[in-house]
Amino acid sequence: MATTQFFLGVDGGATRCRARLRDSSGRELGRGLGPASNIYLDFDEAMRVVRETIEAAIAGGTATQEIAVGLSLAGLSDEKEAERVAAALPGFARVVAVNDAVAACVGANGLGDGGLIIAGTGSAGIARVGAKTTIIGGRGFWLGDDGSAARLGEAALRATLRALDGLEPASGLATALARHFDSDPLRMSRWASDARPRDYGAFAPQILEVARSGDGRAREIVGEAAGAIAALANALGALGAERIALAGGFGEPLRPFLPPDVAQRLSQPRRDAVDGAILLAGGKLADDASCP
């Protein structure tokens, strides 16, 4: 059996898939980038994306049997799912598959105690205190993900449709978002029948922009998202997580809308979920390593 000389971290999410290869000293050797890889929407397609992203990071220069893989996947919830994922990646020295919140928390704080809030297309909170890991939220678009870009987009589009139907007053938010559908409620409904979480999340930057302009309805909806993130922070603190980081593409844009005391408590992640996955696979990180 070949000695593990390389460590590959993969972060597969609802928006994109990223991979990073490091040697045994933690020096970065390669990166890969792919599209969304949500195993709950289409397992086979998600794993195809993961494999292609891995191949891009390796670039044919490293034997897979010498590589330990740490795989961070959105929503992964039990050992059976982790085994299924590992089985879809044969030929590696080993594969460690974990929930993306776990990998992101390790990336943010290292292998010691800490907490993390992920606010991206989806949302989740995680606390790693002592020997116990607790995940809060991260239950998916239909039943969870409060405070995420996708849920913000859904709430804003729902308000827009209500305004078009005359069920609530018109607002600057409704005017701005209705333009994407030529102010046609039927067109909105047809779009929603095929829309995925990332499609809803794509509206988040515009919603925040309208909220910053002072529109009351936009500020109300953004305020609900900020309240959900604050609730996660309070829950993680109650579990004993002293250092809590805020990560995800939606986290920093939402920070100005958070209650001031919560915004002050939430620190910047030290590293990302890809490097967290590398640590969980047994790898090291060079001191000068970066994690965009």
Image: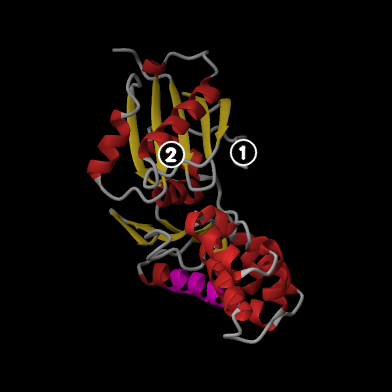
Q: Nearer the viewer, residue 156 or 253?
A: 156
Between tags 2 and 1, which lies in front?
2
Q: Position of residue 100 (x, y in %)?
A: 42, 48
For residue 62, say whether it is visible: yes
Magenta stretch: helix, strand or loop mostly: helix
Alpha carbons under labels 2 and 1: distance apart: 14 Å
Is there a contact, CB below 8 Å, between mark 2 and mark 1?
no
Q: Secondary structure at mark 1?
A: loop
Position of the C terminus by quadrant: top right
Q: Position of residue 150 (x, y in %)?
A: 53, 61
Tag 1 residue = 290
Magenta residue check for 279: no
Q: Nearer the viewer, residue 33 or 183?
A: 183
Tag 2 residue = 277
In percent of the image, x 53 and y 65: which residue is there? 189
Q: What label does residue 251 carry, if any?
A: none
Badge 2 amino acid:
Ala
Q: Nearer the viewer, residue 13 or 229?
A: 13
Question: Is residue 140 shown above or below 292?
Answer: below
Magenta highlight range: 222-234
Q: Secondary structure at mark 2?
A: helix
Q: Position of residue 266 (x, y in %)?
A: 55, 65
- Horizontally, residue 43 falls left or right of residue 269, namely left
Query: Which image quadrant for residue 7?
Result: top left
Q: Nearer the viewer, residue 10 or 42?
A: 42
Query: Which image quadrant for residue 187?
Result: bottom right
In percent of the image, x 32 and y 22: which residue is there? 90
